[in-house]
Image (cartoon, rainbow, N blue to C red):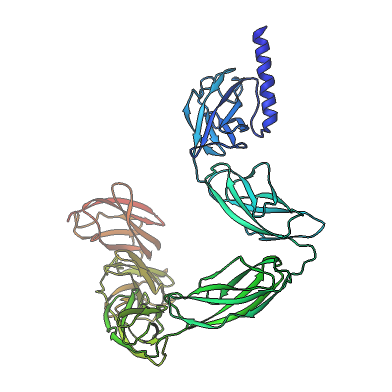
Amino acid sequence: MNKKLSILLLAGICLLVFASNGWTDVNPTKDFAFYRGAAIFNGQPVAIGTVIDAYDPDGIHVGTWTVDSIGFYGSMAVYGDPDLSDTLDEGALEGDLISFKINGHTAVVDSGDASWHNLVFKAVNISAGGVVDFELLAFDDVAVIQAPDTSAHFTVGVKNLGDGLDMYGVNSSSARGWLTIDMPSPAYANPMDTAYVYFDVYIDVWDTLDVDTITFSVFSHLDTTVKVDAAYVVRGFGDTLVQFTILTPASDSSGQPGETVSFSIEVQNDHLDPMFMDYYGVKAVSQNGWPTNGEQMISIAGQASGWVSFDVTIPGSVSTLSDTISYTLYSHLDTTQKYESSVALNITLSSTTIMTVTDPPADRNDVNAGDTVRMLIGARNDGTSLDIYTVSSSSASGWITSDRDSAFNSPGNTVFTYFDVIVPDLAFGASDTISYTISSLLDPSQTFTSSIVISTVIPTIAFTVYNLPTNKQAAPGDQVNLSVGVINNSPVADSYELTSLSSQGWSISLNDSIHIEINDSALFNFDVLIPLGVPDLTDTISFTIRSYIDTTVSYSGSVLITVTSTDVDDDKSALPTVFAVEQNYPNPFNPSTNIGFALPGHSHVNLSVINLLGQIVQSVDLGTLPAGNHLVEFDGMEMASGVYFYRIETEFGAETRKMVLLK
């Protein structure tokens, strides 16, 4: 009876805990254990509202707890899997080690036994750490409280820059002792999300002044050492009129590169009550994007005046000699009351400007196609003030040039500026004239103009031909397929051109250009169309392969095509009656051998050479051949020594024989 009562009591407590914590993906079961203990984050006791989560070894979410006592969690129900017969994983099993997270950060067990056992209370102390950081979003820094209202509500956005869930609170205080009430519970935000904190300010109606400064601090509950301080200016003024007069606007100014220049504006508070305090600020923007710094929160009593200022920092290296600074002076109590204007900021330098080019660039004749060449120009500042040098360049042949933006140079020093020339990829043996000008920004009359010549080298071009076409026999109307291979032996990729000519003027179709990378190869194919009705004759097909980079490097060859025609009255007794392939000779061979075969009629013929692995190492299309005995010379120069098979394939069948290459 006591055992059943205890189980029912634990189940009831567990369901109560489940409901009170608002779990979403935890599956409550009849099997559970209770965990509680100390919880530390970044060395501090966890705050109220911190979320503790429990997981079984399979990553199933088996428990959660929202901390309600500083530094402690629990009792947290951690559920087990009551039914091991099904495949659904509902929770922990006996002996499973439970893992924990604090606000999404993986925790470690500092002490205690974290293993799960049904209906057992566990004391487990845990801790975790992580990045805690945040920033405040922009907020209005003035509140106007109109009668009969006596309070104002302030909301501040907080962006979570940390690596886990965080909670934020706010502490506020009044400079004049007005009542401030902060939000009672924390605001939550996941990484890169925004939470909002708030506080209320209540005006002391007996206070003779109606202006107050509210200071507030936004802090992380997860790590209270991380906080951001800010301030609001609050005003409760009924129908009081806010006005001011600009007595002295900011004036144009000048400065040297690297100098910070200050601008001041004199403003008068026009309120008739000397006890009425207003606050003034200024915002400045540089047209060139130079850094500005406006002084904020200058307080001035009624009928009094004061100076509001802002600073502009001139960069050490500038590409212009002037800037326009736009500024706005405004009242913090009524931001609609503002004054807008602008000033000029000029760079003042000594009038003595002398630029001497000490190291002009020289011609280059060692450049490779595709290179980017940097040309340095040394210039000495012989003047008495800081100067800025610019360079411009152009190509006579349309090559791309890129100039350095600017070079800052102090008196007596030599600086090197430059321009880059991008040489086209195929500009072998080419030259270009590059014109350039270097100028002083302070005195444009100080210029130096010249030019250089950049020449590219021609690499040593070489190539090897292989698979040379052999003499062919054909009949009128045939198309004879010829091919020749090219191996690129040059140190650069090259393109090759094929030209071919028939002595009989027959039509030749070909792929006239191919591109081959270093140590790679490719085949040129060209077809000769034999006209119908031509008599028996022999045509010479000449061909030339030429390098694109160096046209003096070429290879020329020729092949004979013999045309024979037979009619019904011809003696056909000498023609073969069956297809046959003869043994090659010589055999063994090095590096070439002759392969003979017989055709009983016209047929397309292909020769394949196969290694012992069954791989085709060479394939030669012999085209369409007439009936008769044929002899083909095979060149094995590119092959290694070994045993090979050659196979002749025709429309009358195919036959394979063995041959041996010995080198």
Question: Is 348 in front, or is 480?
Answer: 348
476 displayed left or right of 253? left
On screen, residue 619 above or below 193: below
Q: Residue at x 67, y 21 (%)?
A: 13
Question: Is 89 in front, or is 563?
Answer: 89
On screen, residue 176 above or below 419: above
On screen, residue 115 above or below 389: above
Total labels: the figure holds 0
Q: Residue furthest right?
A: 148
Quadrant occupied by the N terminus: top right
Question: Is 434 in front, or is 43?
Answer: 43
Q: Position of residue 166 (x, y in %)?
A: 58, 44
Asked if residue 112 can be seen in this view, the reply is yes
Q: Residue at x 42, y 68 (%)?
A: 568
Q: Residue furthest left?
A: 663
Q: Residue at x 80, y 65 (%)?
A: 239
298 displayed left or right of 501? right
Asked if residue 538 can be seen in this view, the reply is no
568 displayed left or right of 158? left
Q: Position of residue 82 (x, y in %)?
A: 62, 20
Q: Position of residue 494 (x, y in %)?
A: 33, 72
Tell me which corner region of the image, top left, top right, bottom left or bottom right, holds residue 120. Answer: top right
Quadrant occupied by the C terminus: bottom left
Q: Position of residue 375 (x, y in %)?
A: 32, 79
